[in-house]
Amino acid sequence: MPRKKFEPGHDVEHLSILDEKGKLDSRLEPEIDDELLLKMHRTMLFSRRFDEALLKWQRQGRIGTFAPVSGQEAAQVGSAAVLEEEDWMVPAFREFAAAVWRGTPPVGLLLYTAGYNEGGAIPEEQHDLPIAIPVASQLVHAVGIAYGIKYREREQVVLTYFGDGATSEGDFHEAMNMAAVFSTPIVFVCQNNQWAISVPREKQARSRTLAQRALAYGMPGIQVDGNDLLAVYVATQEAVERARAGKGPTLIECVTYRLSVHTTADDPGKYRSEKEVKKWEKRDPIPRFQNYLGNKNLLSKDEIEKLEKEIKEEIQGVWHETEKQMERLGDPMDMFEYVFHEMPPYLEEQRDAYAEFLKERKENHDG
Amino acid sequence: MPRKKFEPGHDVEHLSILDEKGKLDSRLEPEIDDELLLKMHRTMLFSRRFDEALLKWQRQGRIGTFAPVSGQEAAQVGSAAVLEEEDWMVPAFREFAAAVWRGTPPVGLLLYTAGYNEGGAIPEEQHDLPIAIPVASQLVHAVGIAYGIKYREREQVVLTYFGDGATSEGDFHEAMNMAAVFSTPIVFVCQNNQWAISVPREKQARSRTLAQRALAYGMPGIQVDGNDLLAVYVATQEAVERARAGKGPTLIECVTYRLSVHTTADDPGKYRSEKEVKKWEKRDPIPRFQNYLGNKNLLSKDEIEKLEKEIKEEIQGVWHETEKQMERLGDPMDMFEYVFHEMPPYLEEQRDAYAEFLKERKENHDG
Amino acid sequence: MADLTMVEAINLALRQEMENDDRVLVLGEDVGVDGGVFRVTDGLIDEFGEERSIDTPVAEAGIVGMSIGMAIYGLRPVCEMQFSGFSYFAFHQVEGHAARMRWRSRGRYGIPMVIRMPYGGGVHALEHHSESREVIYAHTPGLKMVIPSGPRSARALLVSAIRDPDPVIFFESKLMYRSLREEVPDDEETLPIGESRVVREGSDLTMISYGAMLHRTLEAAEKLSEDDGVEPEVVDLLTISPLDDRKFTDSVRKTGRVVVVHEAPRSFGPAGEIMARINERSFYYLEAPVERVTGFDVHVPYFAREQAYLPDVDRIVYGARKALNA
Amino acid sequence: MADLTMVEAINLALRQEMENDDRVLVLGEDVGVDGGVFRVTDGLIDEFGEERSIDTPVAEAGIVGMSIGMAIYGLRPVCEMQFSGFSYFAFHQVEGHAARMRWRSRGRYGIPMVIRMPYGGGVHALEHHSESREVIYAHTPGLKMVIPSGPRSARALLVSAIRDPDPVIFFESKLMYRSLREEVPDDEETLPIGESRVVREGSDLTMISYGAMLHRTLEAAEKLSEDDGVEPEVVDLLTISPLDDRKFTDSVRKTGRVVVVHEAPRSFGPAGEIMARINERSFYYLEAPVERVTGFDVHVPYFAREQAYLPDVDRIVYGARKALNA
Ligand SMILES: Cc1ncc(C[n+]2csc(CCOP(=O)(O)OP(=O)(O)O)c2C)c(N)n1
Ligand SMILES: Cc1ncc(C[n+]2csc(CCOP(=O)(O)OP(=O)(O)O)c2C)c(N)n1
Ligand SMILES: [Mg+2]
Ligand SMILES: [Mg+2]
């Protein structure tokens, strides 16, 4: 036995249930009740349309930059839908679909996108973290929350999102390793959307899959078709069950695609071909799932049309409500708030001096 | 194929050639010429005795703290010996045996340990980096050097050392990933000495081996008996050849043991048992290798004794030479040197002001 | 009352807070079984178990990041960076999240955590083990930055830091860990974060310092009193941020002459802010330029020369005389 | 001579230095195929190939760390942090190694590298994309810290930074990237690192600034001249560390009144050091307290309010008048 092969202790699997041609592997098909199926569909569709609206408003100069979700709706909704309300969701910066599923008011998302700190507020009953922009940095928070759950012997689990690019950051590694070492109830959902801004997945890592990174931590890893909501749902369900049963963390790689720009500051024409985008458009998770629901007689063409109209109106409503709120917001004095629980004297002083300046300026202007 | 196992692309092997009982697997025995074998032995023995001397001097208050190498000599010498002079060696902080092999003057090591910056100098012809104390931080430098080699199309390789604890740091991850992505000529040698100060290997990582962390990067990984100089040598040779042939990086996990304290500030009695230490003393790489050389009729008991005496004298010589140098060193003004290539005006000013202060103090004292 | 070293006093604070409040836990490299490389957390694992006295992998960003998550979950983590020189591995977590989470979430998630770390020179340590870079933290909005000057203040301030609803960076002078003892009450004692104090009264010169350098400053004050017949007033900052400028403003307005002492490098160092505040609040009271006696703008030399780097009593006296005689 | 934006001017510097010296290469996230998220490295990959215009994984510590290794090997890497707000992921590499390697190796391994990064507010960016924390670098021994104030100085200083034998942190104002143009000579031009300059002469007030805020300061100076009939002298620091205090010392000794303007947070900010130097060199020339007009000690608010955070012309004028009328 001097030169022998060593088994890493876990297999890396690939899972697909509803393929891009719409073919269903019925042996693997999960049992999900109709209401939930329809709600998942609606959330995906809403997210797509909201994305499109945001893009339009951004191009019109009405809001700032944001990171579109288009193409990744199944990866987000299929995983978030497994969570209970009491569970925790720790997003990166592209998880608008997951946020909507979890109950974040779209008005908040829009306010955030329009540059108002007020948009970052998380409703009191929601166990979600705010957007985390520094790549991979949120993963360690998720592990800390999961540690807390374990310490308090609660039934909750944590689910955290990140991209393919994030798997290159040191924080990803430390989070995965510590999650495994402390055997915490957490599910790591990597949305491998093939691109980290302009850098393709193959230049991000040499490993065949991102899922196999789990082996480094003695953790199970699974790669799923991330545009297949059923596969995402099943893999997440298994991982959540494992976590809830005290069996520790899992890494899920959802193979998906960012159909839109990285953010509105980005020009994908610089680095990827239309052909590639076209290829992935054929794998779009939404029509695929609609087709599935159609085959199950849960959703007709007409109903989709009705839903589209409903969503359109809803989004218009979101805009109007946000506009109204924006009129009330914008007091610059707000910037001194929430830095500390109690404002320390030096900040009060800065605030007062600034208020004094504004007053004088106004007086000079008016006078 | 919807639910299928995914092959990570590489196997993780375990290699042992000369086991702790002295049993040799002659099919795997490398061909190493006698001179090299004896030089490796001498370096291991010198390092052990130097370590013991340092510990003694430290306890006598003659030098400061340091990180003893005892127990890890085979892991270091067996790997460093594969390198050519033109190759690069990037150490952590415990690589005194590797440094001695590479030609670092022991006087320098001792000066460093005695708190003199002069001890950190690397001889001009030596392609080694100085000691890096922040855990795992040196690995990314090694990758940069390896990138430079590739860019310049040179035949060199880089070998870098680190511990089991280091594999938990983000920098380890970023280095491994980038080394693989850029397919650089580098060998990662992890000395898994079972402890990161007081934290045992099992609390550092949940994976069965550290070698399997290579799979996360699409890189070959191998675990070797790190107290078996022959196994270390063979694994390193394979990895160096692979690197030199342009086939990219390798991770080698040397399973070894820190027989002594973490540093002289440490009390292992707090966290590990004498029994464990005793177990590992039986696996001591030096007697094992002496036994092997004895069986090959390359080294007799008498010769070992002679060598021990020679080394003892050499170490005394090192002390005397260092003492002499220390008398000449210690000018505080040296602290302003080497911060920049050219001293900027504000530093000149600080230096001059300090010199003025020292002058006045001396005058007051003398006067 | 017990006569405690700083190590013992900090240990007492941790132990009592852990006893009082099961949300409090400690984590870091070697803080559990080993009791910390300086023994600051010694025995906590025996009393509170390994779930509350957590040995972590070697991963500073992970330690701070996990602590942030714990704080969000409602715990009160006290994490340790083994040396302040390694805290930079986690700076993106501190700056990017610990300092911002309350603000980002509009008050939903405060981060009541303490990051303890030994700082400063003078103990013959290796490279990276002797730095004093409080400015990096003090300049970061959303953080509090505390540097006690002895066992009693360390204990009282640490208790306050643990109870503080916001993240506190807590520097502990290695040089003082075992070199002095103070009476520390057995019962609870706190000191408010954000308040400095006058530790020696005088009318001729204001000396401002904190941490390990406070003691050299006090010695220098005595020397000035004995040798030069001047009576310096000495202010111990205790908190670096929020910086309490009331005490030293009062003092400067009285004395008109100031020396600021710290071991951090000079340029863009803490004295800069103190001098700015003096300029803003006491400009018309100043009779001479403020002197600063600081570490130099170099890396702390290896230990054979580190005392040359650190302000010593003579250098402080020299600086004080400049301020007095200008 | 060409009329260039700052993006184009920096691109020119990189291109010419890469043409002149095959040791120079650029690396970072999206700097290759994409040409950088601000297009600063646009086209370099076409001219110099992907081995010299390197798209890296998302790994800041790796980028800086690899650059250190490259510099040790004899190359001259120019690496990019996509935004200064993410440079903290690499701060341990900068502080622990880039700044120390020459010193640690007794001169054997200098680190001739440049770390470029966009800094500052005003472009409607997301959180973490608008900070100005030059102090963190300026306070670190062994680093140089440069902030140009326009296309021409950016080009000339970047060439000097690339040729500098020591590590240089190079902040580029996003606000200026495309908002102004300057004539930039086609032929090589350098500016010495560590030298500030007077960009407007005057005798009544010294205004000290740099980077994007310099332009608001200049506007404020014009306004003061027009409205109040005072002639401010304006100093553009250009280099933050080593800080050149000669120009502003001369100016302060002439005017006796000073305002310092920066967008970094106020406390422990750059103005502190400048005020300390003024205190040390020009104490007896000062006629009024030095005023500082700075960012506040808060996180840069999201963009609906970010202009309130940034010093604007009115706020600078307001501060200047305080200095003038005190
Ligand atoms: C630490 C850090 N570095 C750089 C950036 C700039 N940046 C924003 S998104 C991104 C790429 C992330 O790629 P990935 O993780 O795949 O997520 P995706 O954008 O594809 O959803 C980069 C480099 C950042 N936000 N944080
Ligand atoms: C970044 C960093 N964190 C913490 C330390 C303190 N420290 C020194 S050695 C060590 C353990 C390292 O363990 P390992 O990598 O296994 O190396 P070994 O000491 O066993 O050789 C720690 C935590 C450090 N030097 N650097
Ligand atoms: Mg991606
Ligand atoms: Mg170890």
Image: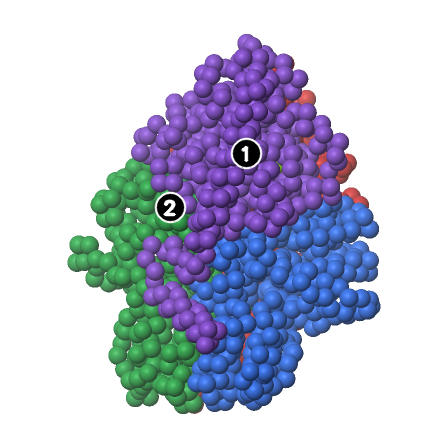
Chain colours: A purple, B red, C green, D blue
Q: Residue at x 48, y 87 (%)?
A: D286
User: Which residue is under mark 2?
Assistant: C109
Q: Quadrant of residue A338?
A: bottom left
Labels 2, 1: one chain: no
Q: Quadrant of residue B299?
A: top right
Could you classify mark 1 by the number of other residues whose Cα lies within 10 Å: few (under 14), some (14-19), or many (20 or more)? some
Q: Nearer the viewer, residue C323 or D4?
A: D4
Q: Residue at x 46, y 53 (%)?
A: A327
How far apart are the alpha carbons under marks 2 and 1? 33 Å
Q: Nearer the viewer, mark 2 or mark 1?
A: 1
Q: Position of residue B278 (x, y in %)?
A: 43, 33
Q: Residue at x 71, y 53 (%)?
A: D39
Q: How many marks?
A: 2
Q: Position of residue C231 (x, y in %)?
A: 29, 84
Q: Taking B250 as reference, is A62 left or right?
A: left
User: Which residue is under mark 1?
Assistant: A312
Q: Nearer the viewer, residue B180 or A93?
A: A93
> Please, which chain is the residue tagged with disc 1 on?
A
Q: Taking A193 as reference, is C283 left or right?
A: left
Q: Position of residue D24 (x, y in %)?
A: 75, 56
- Residue closest to the far top: A27
Vertical comparison of D195 with B177: above or below: below
Label 1 sits on what residue type? Lys
Label 2 sits on what residue type? Tyr
Q: Nearer the viewer, residue C269 or B39?
A: C269
Tell me if I can see residue D172 in this picture.
Answer: yes
> Please, which chain is the residue tagged with disc 2 on?
C
For the C terminus of chain B, give its image quadrant: bottom left
For the N terminus of chain B, give its image quadrant: top right
Vertical comparison of A152 with A26: above or below: below
Q: Secondary structure at mark 2?
A: loop
